[in-house]
Amino acid sequence: MTVTLQYDHAPGEDRAPASEEAAVQQPEDIDPALVDFAVLAAWMDERGLPGGPFEDVARLTGGTQNTLVRFRRGGAGYVLRRGPEHLRAKTNEVLRREARVLSALDGTGVPAPRIIASCPDEKVMGGAVFYLMTPVEGFNASVSLPEPHASDAAVRHAMGLNAARALSALGAVDHEAAGLGDFGRPDGFLERQVGRWTSELESYSALDGYPGPDIPGLDKVAAWLEANRPAVWRPGIMHGDYHLANLMYGFGGPKVAAIVDWEMCTIGDPLLDLGWLLATWPDHGDESARLAGPLGAAGGLPSGAELVAAYAERGAATAGRDLSSITWYAVLACFKLGIVLEGTHARAFAGKAPKETGDLLHGITLGLFRRAEAFIAS
C-alpha cells in the first residue's frame, strides 16, 4: 500500500527522545546535511514503518543529479530520493511531482518504483523534499551489460521490444482516473512545442561567449514541424525523457524492471515519449549510439518500425492516437532534445560547463538534426 503523508510540524516536535536519536548511527560516507539518519529514523517511526538500525547503506549512482541512498531497516529495503546537495530552484517541486505520479501509477502495471512514503515538507530534512521507494533489482544497460544479455542477440532484441511495451503500459493509463487530471497543461500542448523550444534556444545567446547556434537544418526542421502537426491527439501521462538510459532491466532476461528518473513527467501527448525513444534509438552510424552505452555498442536491437509495432500491441495505448503520425513525434523529439543538449554547449562557451562535454553534446545535437532530416525524407 502506498503511504503518502504530510509531515505537518517542524523538526524537533513530537520526535523520539534525544537519547533514542543519539542511538541512530550516521553512516560515515553520508553527509548529515544531505541525509540526517536521526531525522529519517524519527520520521519513519512516526509513519509506522519498521524500526531498528539502518543497514547496508549505500549511495547509488546512475546519471542523475538527484541523490539516491539505498538501505535496509527492520527487514525492509528502501531507496531514498532527494535533490542534490545544492538544491536547484525547482528541485523540491519536481520531487513532489515525481512522488505524486509514482503514487498514481501504483497498481497500473507500469514498471516503475513504488512509493512507500513521501515527505513533501521541505522543513523536515534540511530544506529538501524526499521520498522512500521500493528498490529496483536490475541494471542500467547504458552503464553495464551483464550475461546473458551481453552475448545473446535475441535477448537484446527482446530488450528493445520490451522498452516499447513498457512505454505502451504507461500510455494506456487513464490519467484522470489515476487522479492526475490537474497535473499538467494538455490544452495546446502540441501547438506550443516549436515556439517553446525555439525560445529556449534563443535564450542561450545571453551567455557570454556563445556565438549562437550553428545547427544545419534547424529552420527547415522547425518549419516542417509547424506545417505537419497532427490534428488529433489524446492526452495522457508522459515520462518526458524516455530512452534506454532511464530503464532498468532484470538480471535474468529482457524484462524491463522499472522506468526511472521521472523528473520531466507531465500530462501531454504520450506519443512524444515513443518519438523520443525513436530519436535516441542506437544507430551505429551516428553519435546516438553513445546515449545507449554498452547496449547500443552491442547491437542486435530491433528497428524503429518494430518498436512502433510493439507499442501498438496494447490497444489501450493507441486508442485515439494516430500512430501514422509517429514520424512527426520523432522529429519533434530530435528538435527538442537537440536544443536541450545545445544548452550545455552554450554554457561551455561561458565557462559554466567543461568544453569537452559541450563539444560532445553539440556533436550529438548535430546528429539529432541529421536524424530529424532523415525522418522527414523517409
Image: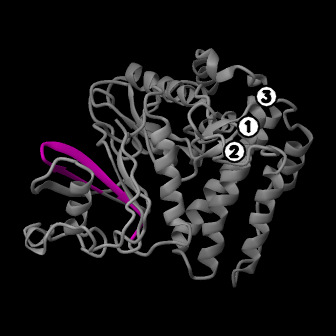
Label drawn at residue 333: 2
Please report whichever mark, 3 or 2, sits nearer to the chain's N-terminal start: 3
Q: Secondary structure at mark 1?
A: helix
In the picture provided, is 333 more to the left or to the right than 289?
A: right
Which stretch is magenta? 69-84
Callout 1 amino acid:
Tyr
Which residue is labeled 1 in the image?
A: 329
Please name the residue shown 10% across and 54% down the image. Answer: 52
Badges 1 and 2: C-beta atoms under 8 Å apart? yes
CB under 8 Å between callouts 1 and 3? yes
Q: Is residue 244 left or right of residue 273?
A: left
Residue reaching furthest to the right: 227
Image quadrant holding the C terminus, namely top right
Label 3: which residue?
A: 325
Q: Local crowd at mark 1 within 10 Å, few (<14), some, or many (≥20)?
A: many
User: Horizontally, is 208 left or right of 233 in the view?
Assistant: left
Of the residues shown, which amino acid type is indicated by label 2?
Ala
